[in-house]
Amino acid sequence: MKPQIFLRDVVKTYGRFKALDRISLSIERGEKVAILGPNGAGKTTLVKVISGQIRATSGRVEVMGKNPAEFSRELRKNMGFVSHNPMLYDELTAYENLKFYANLYDVESGDRIEELLKKLRLYGRRHSRVKTFSRGMKQRLAIARALLHDPEILILDEPTSGLDIEGRLELLMNLSTLEKTVLLTTHNLSEAERLCNRAVILMNGKIVAECGINEAESVYLKHCRL
Amino acid sequence: MKPKFLEIAWKDLIIEFRSKSTISLMVLFSLVTSMLFSITVPVAYAQSIGASLLWLIFIFVGMLGYARAFIREVELETLEGLKLAPVHPASILAGKMIYNIVLMFLMELVVVPVFVGVFNMSIAKPLLFFGVLTLGNAAFAVTMSSLAVLVIKSRSKELLLPVIAFPVIFPVVSSTVFALNMTVSGRIQGIASPLKLVVSFAVILLTLAFLTSEYVFMD
């Protein structure tokens, strides 16, 4: 069976700077993979390439057999993306934000929106404008936005960044129950351990190691010391 | 379910009417400029150059307002959300164009009566005048929205847009002013020619913008 996410010799450069250097990676359907690495390792660039937000300079990228840099309605409908930026409109209410995205994703909105708002404990504030929400509430709503269309692949780019401990734990709890292919970028090992079963360690734009999540800490520290 | 581009335009209009961040600025700017023109330009000349002055106001206001539809998405980092959605970039662009056309039409409803009143202009064909103005503004909105996509990634986007826009919008501006002057004087024979030019120019730019939208929206 073909892997759901497949990268071979992917390079991304910004001028002379190589953000990704010959990345090869294969992720099967249903796998939960953590991309670990220090700040500036290239984690966000990697997930942006995979999600089709930016184009790789060279190399082959395939997500569900398609190049994500080329517009594909089918592929976009099967991907959900949560990052530190919730991608929500402050002047719209929680419900309106989800309704807007539901329409873009051709989701029959009413029940699905209510279900997600209840699940993520935002139902009581569904008619409040997002600008009145705390950071944690915005992140929960961002998860609802990413799950609206029930995607097969969920990409999480440091989703807990800027959250307090309570918000972080709550978010991880919500995410850990999902049965999807998950790609998580983080520099927090404990988060990766809670959500993923495999780790890919990225440093200076290169994959330096791949291992099971239980070995991630020792492998990560070993590479950090080098 | 509305077509995607209408969803995007509707969402932008709701946000604009709630925040009033762009329209209030545009209306205020237009009114202040109208007043300044009324002080500096003798009323005797109003009949002959009024249409040109009015268009000048719309150009300045357009420069201020058109890019905002995209810049707001960039500032709020919501453009990424649109780029990730199963919406073709051409639909995003079309949504922004419609939003800008509606915004400009609302501006016309406020500014034109004030301007005509301040200058005591008499327009021989008022309905046609308003129609030509709307058509010109629509073509202008299409042009500016297409160009705005090109500058959103630049650091000085709000300054860069007028610089690249002025040479491009010249055919729209000159033809619209020509047609507007005809409606003011009432001598409308041959008005179809400048209007055809405006429409053709808008269609060409629209086609180019849609064809290149996928490339332009990507990194």
Image: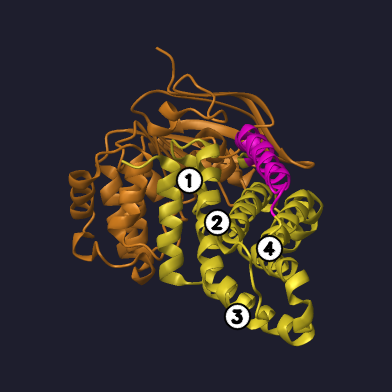
Q: Which chain is orange?
A: A
Against B25, residue A218 (above or below) is above
**Disc 1 to disc 2, C-alpha distance:** 18 Å
Same chain assignment for discs 4 and 1: yes
At label 1, the amino acid type is: Leu
The local secondary structure at tag 1 comes to helix
Q: Label 2, on which residue?
A: B100
Q: Which mark is residue B82?
A: 1
- How crowded is the residue under tag 2: few (<14 C-alpha within 10 Å), some, or many (20+)? many
- From this viewpoint, is residue B20 visible? yes
Query: Magenta stretch?
Result: B188-216
Q: Which mark is residue B63?
A: 4
Q: Label 3, on which residue?
A: B117
Q: Where is residue B131 drawn, in percent x and y?
A: 57, 56
Against A7, residue B38 (above or below) is below
Quadrant for residue A183, please give it: top left
Q: Magenta span has B196?
A: yes
**Disc 4 to disc 2, C-alpha distance:** 11 Å
The disc, 4 or 1, on the residue closer to the chain's N-terminal end is: 4
Against A50, residue B98 (above or below) is below
Rendered-image quadrant of the C terminus of chain B? top right
The local secondary structure at tag 3 comes to helix
At label 4, the amino acid type is: Met
The tint of chain B in the picture is yellow
Same chain assignment for discs 3 and 2: yes
